Structure formats: structure tokens, C-alpha cells
Amino acid sequence: MIVAFIRVSTEEQAKSGLGLEDQEETIKKWVDKLAIPLRKLVIDPGHTAGKDLDKRPILREAIGLLERGDILLVVKRDRLSRGDPVAMARIEREVAKRRARIISAAGEGTWRSDSSALFERRMHDAFAERELAVIGERTRAALRAKRRRGEVAGAVPFGWTAVV
């Protein structure tokens, strides 16, 4: 059977539904294409994939549903982990312990288990890690620019009042 996992990073993305809707539509197409029953679609709305597995209860729930021969289906590997190759390796180990496997609708080396496929998966993981770092750099640069313009940037400390 298939356990599908979809995720967006921010509450704003979750509220808009667009990212989740697109992922859900892709998952449904792949479930039909694979002709394997869907046990459950697990939705993680508004949580980063940069955290360790221990701090991601919804992903742990999805992995916990897997049984021998099952597939954990994602749209892209970065829905599982982003920015930490150790975290991704841990997720893969947890899935493998259940005698299940991860399949990405985007491919990303998840359809095979040879050394070339492993290399491809690791390269995709490295690009996801870099993308997360670039997003952080852009965010910090934008906040610095706001501060230079005298705008409030970031959260106002508890008990303080922002003067604009």
C-alpha cells in the first residue's frame, strides 16, 4: 500500500492551500498510475523540513503507518528533509526498518536501488540543502535592507512596542 506525505513550510502556504492542493493532485495521479491502494494521505501543514525527525511528529506518524512492502510516496524528496543529509539518511533508515521504500513522483533516483540511483538521490539532497541555505541568505538580506530603511524587521521582543 501507499502512505503519501505532503508538506508546506509556512502557515501562510498552508492557509492558501495552493501548495498542498498541487501536491495532493500529484499524489492522486501517481496513486492511480501505480495502481496501488492509498492507505493514508498524511498532511504536514506549515512545518519546515529542516528539523530532525524527532521534532516532526507528523512525518513520524507517516513512517509509523508503513508496513512491509509499502511505499512512502512524496512529490519530491525535499518534502521529507531539506538541509540535513544526516536527517534524510535517518528517515531512509526508519523507512527501510519497516521494509518499505520511499518513492518520489519527481523520480530523483527513487525508482532504482543501484549505486547510480543512490548517487542521484544524494545529489538531489545536496541541492535541497543548498536551496535552503540560499533562502536563509535572501531572508537575512531582506531583513537587513528593511532595517537600513528604518522599518521594523523581525519579531518585536515580548514587552516591547515597535515605533514605526
Image (tube, rainbow, N blue to C red):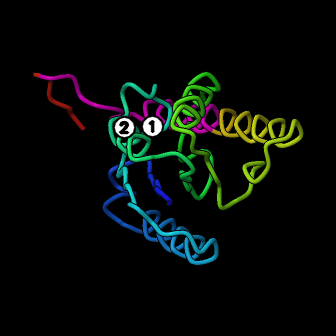
Q: Decide whether the magenta segment is chiefly helix, strand or loop.
A: helix
Per the image, is 144 magenta?
Answer: yes
Asked whether residue 96 is in view, the answer is yes
Q: Nearer the viewer, residue 136 or 35?
A: 35
Q: Earlier in the sequence, mark 1 or mark 2?
A: 1
Asked whether residue 145 is in view, the answer is no
- Whether pointer 1 and pointer 2 mark residues with C-beta atoms closer than 8 Å, the reply is yes
Image position of 99 with respect to 71: above or below: above
Q: Residue at x 20, y 33 (%)?
A: 163
Q: Residue at x 35, y 58 (%)?
A: 14
Q: Residue at x 55, y 71 (%)?
A: 31
Q: Residue at x 50, y 59 (%)?
A: 2
Residue annotated with mark 1:
146
Residue annotated with mark 2:
151
Per the image, is 27 magenta?
Answer: no
Image position of 142 with respect to 18: above or below: above
